[in-house]
Image (tube, helix red, strand yellow):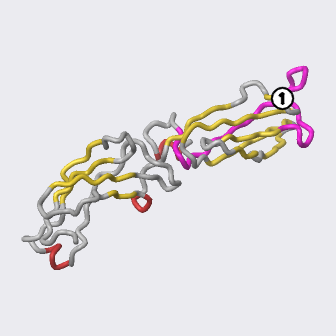
Amino acid sequence: DEKIGEKHKDAGLLYAGDTVTFRPQVFDAFENQTALPEGAMKIVHALPNGNESELPFQVQVRGGTTTYDVRHDATAAGEHQVRITLFDKQISGSPVRFNVLPDKPEPPFCKLNLPEEDLIVNTECIAVVKTYDKFGNECRSGGLAPQVRDSSSAEQKTSAEHSPPECSGIVPSESGSNGAAAAARAHARAARR
């Protein structure tokens, strides 16, 4: 799929937002492709959170051959399972299992956790940034380069005397979560009150 190749370096991986396509093949007793009676096939998708839903499929007839196409946009990160049954019996190759990784972090959905103690001017502090993709999946690795914005007035931002805060580095958080600990040096005049 071109979309996967453009969006992600490793096209062999599935990321939240990618489309998963299945095409179950149905044969008669003589190994000829055949059409099914309505309601004979059921496709159930088990999500990583344990919820299940039936997936719709599209029936197409081309040149006398009937195909059954299932397209699903995977938005939940984690282990997925799709069970395909004919007359309430699983077909060969079912269930199909696949793992979906979180998409890239989306800044509007990310959360900054500041230390509980007051921040003091010109002292280093640790702040944990939890990153989430646009589907709400917690990102476990990677991420965007940190940027710190100075919320002071435009006059202070442009003044050479008052440079905006800088981010001195990113290291994995000690808790093992997706957070990144950002050691930030505050170069503002007043401490947060």
**Height in image: 90 above or below 49?**
above
Specify the segment rendered in magenta: 14-41
Q: Nearer the viewer, residue 41 or 52?
A: 52
Magenta: main secondary structure: loop
- Residue 53 in the image: x percent, y percent? 73, 46
User: In which quadrant of the rendered image does the C terminus lie?
Assistant: bottom left
> Which residue is at 51% across, 34% downward?
12
- For label 1, the residue is 89
User: In which quadrant of the rendered image does the N terminus lie?
Assistant: top right
**Height in image: 96 above or below 103?**
above
- Indicate whether residue 152 is drawn in magenta: no
- Residue 63 vs residue 164: left or right? right
Q: Dividing the picture into quarters, in which one does residue 83 lie?
A: top right
Q: Dividing the picture into quarters, in which one does residue 52 lie?
A: top right
- Residue 159 in the image: x percent, y percent? 11, 74
Report crowding for label 1: few under 14, some 14 to 19, many 20 or more residues within 10 A (C-alpha).
Answer: few
- Residue 33 vs residue 183: left or right? right
Q: Nearer the viewer, residue 120 or 141?
A: 120
- Residue 164 in the image: x percent, y percent? 17, 66
Give the residue at the far right of this rendering: 37
> Which residue is at 47% across, 46% downward?
6
Kind of residue indicated by mark 1: Lys
- Residue 68 vs residue 135: left or right? right
- Residue 103 in the image: x percent, y percent? 48, 48
